[in-house]
Every structure is written in structure tokens, then in C-alpha cells.
């Protein structure tokens, strides 16, 4: 029964709650000061669900092309043509970091490409549990491509948990094996420039991705392509083509856009109020109690 409900009807309940909230002055069933947060979360969930259902129905959802992701297959193809390996560096943090999880997901797609092109893949890891997760991701990708014979556990191996010792070990691998394509996808710190400079010196195509704002400038300087900030987190959705993930990314984009308009609206109203061009009490409209914070 629920599956037969039209997508437009998703908005009926939030609309009724909003109308009741705006015109109800005597019975307040919200915790004082939390009304705006409630409707923001509710609207976000409804918007994301709307686009997920839209994607599942097969509707065309436009996603901005990102050059770094389009270059991934090109980099693996170049490595295959040159007869060199592909090096994938998943960062130095554990699975408690979202950057590492995103890096392992992207690794699965890169492993699928290397299985299809029959290219050698090398994944040095800094954390043992990340190594196990990376092995499972690679094994699954090789099975999906119908080439389990090409997979072996030695392609994903442990180096060390020391930051700069790990960087030295990976640099040694690059100088010895001369990989044609190098991927840096995960959580990085001070070792980022050490790795990227070595990869640049051997002439490899380098594609980096991280959420560490302090390390992005180093990757931008030394790498050919970089997934910056949210592009890195959205990469798995782009590469997978999953309706749930694509719809979620699209819904989040619209929520962020509406938040930007809301912030702009509040700023403009505040400016107009300051110059006595308008007399709109924002705290009364949104029923926000701001007097306690001032005191």
C-alpha cells in the first residue's frame, strides 16, 4: 500500500504540520526553541527521499561531471597500455574516519577497472583493519568482473603504522615499480606532499581525494586531478550508479541550496530592519527564543 502512494503525497504530512505550527498559538507541542530544527530535519529527509524515489523510478537525474572521476578509467587504461602497475594509497587513518571509508569504497571501483583491464594493482596499507577491508573490497570487485583468478591477497598488504615510515615505504614502492597511475584516496596528513612529489617525479598520473582541507593544497599542486571536499565523499555515488546514492546526493544538494537561500533571506531582512525599511521580527516568525542567549 505504501509503495503505491505517489511521490507528491510525501509532502502532505510536513505541509499539515507546518500549517498547524504557524497558526497554532495556544498549544505548543514542540520543545521551546527546537521548532525550526525539527522542520529543517523533516524537510531535509523528505527532499532526499523524494529524489531517491525519483532515481528508482528511472527518471533522469543530472549530476555535474567531475573531471577527476572521469580520469580514473583513463589512468588505469594508461597503466595497462604501458604494462605498469596501479598504486592505490588509502591514507593512514582507520575505519573510524569517513575519509578512509570513502577511500575503500572507491578502491572497489578501481579494483573492478584493473580486473577488467588485467592491470596489476598494488595497495599498501597503514592500518591492519583497513587492509582487511581493502582486501574484501578488491576480492568482491574481481568476482563481480568474473576474474577471481587475477586476485591475490598479496596485492593488498600491510606496511607499518608509523606515519613517516609508511610514507618512506610507499615512496620506495613508487621508485622501484614505477606505477603509471597513482591514487591517493583517504585521510592524509603531513605525508601527503612527500607522496605526491615522489609520484610526480616518476611521471605517473596522480588522482587524489581527501576531506582534509589542510592537505588539499599540496595535492592540487602535485597531482593531475583532485577530488576536493564533498566531491570526494560523493565519488562513490557517482561511480556506483546506485539510485539510492545518486538520489541522496541530489537531495542533499537541494537542501544545501535552500539553506543558502534561507541564510540570504535572514541577512537581507536583518539589513532592512537595521535601516528601518522593514519591521519584521524573525524571532517571532520562527518562534525562536533568542533573549536567553543574549543574557
Image: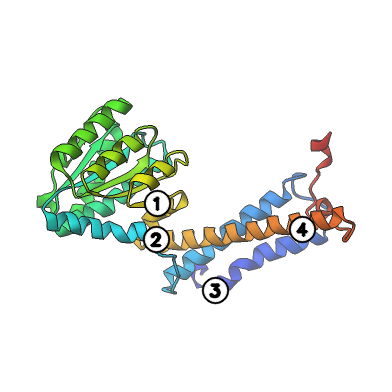
Can you give x and y, in whole percent of width and height, for residue 84 in the image?
13, 50
Q: Quadrant of residue 56?
A: bottom left
Asked if labels 2 and 4 touch by Cβ distance under 8 angstroms, the answer is: no
Q: Label 2, on which residue?
A: 66
In this picture the colour scheme is rainbow
Asked if labels 3 and 2 touch by Cβ distance under 8 angstroms, the answer is: no
Can you give x and y, in whole percent of width and height, for residue 285 in the image?
81, 56
Above or below, 241 against 84 in this view is below
Q: CA distance from mark 3 to mark 4?
A: 37 Å
User: Which residue occupies 33% across, 48% down?
Assistant: 223
Q: Label 3, on which residue?
A: 6
Asked if labels 2 and 1 touch by Cβ distance under 8 angstroms, the answer is: yes
User: Which residue occupies 34% across, 47% down?
Assistant: 208
Q: Relative to the observer, which residue lies in front, 57 or 247? A: 247
Q: CA distance from mark 3 to mark 1?
A: 37 Å
**Front label number (2 vs 3):** 2
Q: Label 4, on which residue?
A: 268
Q: Relative to the observer, which residue lies in front, 246 or 50? A: 246
Dot 1 or dot 4, earlier in sequence: 1
Can you give x and y, in whole percent of width and height, for residue 159 in the image?
22, 30
Above or below, 266 against 10 in this view is above
Dot 3 or dot 1, earlier in sequence: 3
Dot 4 or dot 2, earlier in sequence: 2
Q: Label 1, on which residue?
A: 227
Q: From the image, which quarter does the C terminus lie in?
A: top right
Amino acid at each position: 500500500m505504501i509503495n503505491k502512494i505517489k511521490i507528491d503525497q510525501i509532502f502532505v504530512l510536513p505541509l499539515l504540520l507546518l500549517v498547524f505550527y504557524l497558526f497554532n498559538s495556544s498549544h505548543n507541542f514542540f520543545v521551546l526553541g527546537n521548532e525550526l530544527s525539527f522542520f529543517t530535519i523533516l524537510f531535509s529527509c523528505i527532499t532526499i527521499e523524494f529524489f531517491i524515489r525519483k532515481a528508482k523510478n528511472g527518471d533522469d537525474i543530472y549530476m555535474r561531471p567531475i573531471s577527476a572521476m572521469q580520469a580514473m578509467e583513463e589512468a588505469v587504461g594508461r597503466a595497462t597500455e604501458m604494462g605498469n602497475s596501479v598504486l592505490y594509497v588509502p591514507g593512514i587513518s582507520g575505519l573510524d574516519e569517513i575519509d578512509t571509508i570513502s577511500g575503500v569504497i572507491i578502491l572497489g571501483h578501481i579494483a573492478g577497472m584493473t580486473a577488467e583491464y588485467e592491470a596489476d594493482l598494488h595497495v599498501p596499507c597503514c592500518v591492519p583493519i583497513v587492509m582487511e577491508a581493502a582486501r574484501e573490497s578488491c576480492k568482491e570487485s574481481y568476482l563481480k568482473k568474473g576474474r577471481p583468478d587475477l586476485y591475490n591477497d598479496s596485492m593488498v598488504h600491510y606496511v607499518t603504522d608509523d606515519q613517516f615510515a609508511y610514507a618512506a615505504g610507499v615512496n620506495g614502492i613508487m621508485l622501484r615499480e614505477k606505477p603509471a597511475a597513482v591514487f591517493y584516496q583517504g585521510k592524509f596528513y603531513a605525508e601527503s606532499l612527500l607522496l605526491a612529489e615522489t609520484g610526480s617525479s616518476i611521471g605517473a598520473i596522480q588522482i587524489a581525494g581527501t576531506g582534509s582541507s589542510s592537505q588539499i593544497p599540496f595535492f592540487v599542486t602535485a597531482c593531475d586531478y583532485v577530488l576536493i571536499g564533498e566531491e570526494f565523499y560523493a565519488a562513490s555515488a557517482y561511480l556506483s550508479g546506485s539510485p539510492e546514492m545518486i538520489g541522496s546526493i541530489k537531495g542533499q544538494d537541494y537542501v544545501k541550496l535552500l539553506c543558502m537561500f534561507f541564510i540570504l533571506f535572514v541577512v537581507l531582512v536583518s539589513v532592512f530592519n537595521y535601516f528601518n525599511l522593514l519591521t519584521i521580527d524573525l524571532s517571532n516568525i520562527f518562534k525562536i527564543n533568542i533573549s536567553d542567549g543574549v543574557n
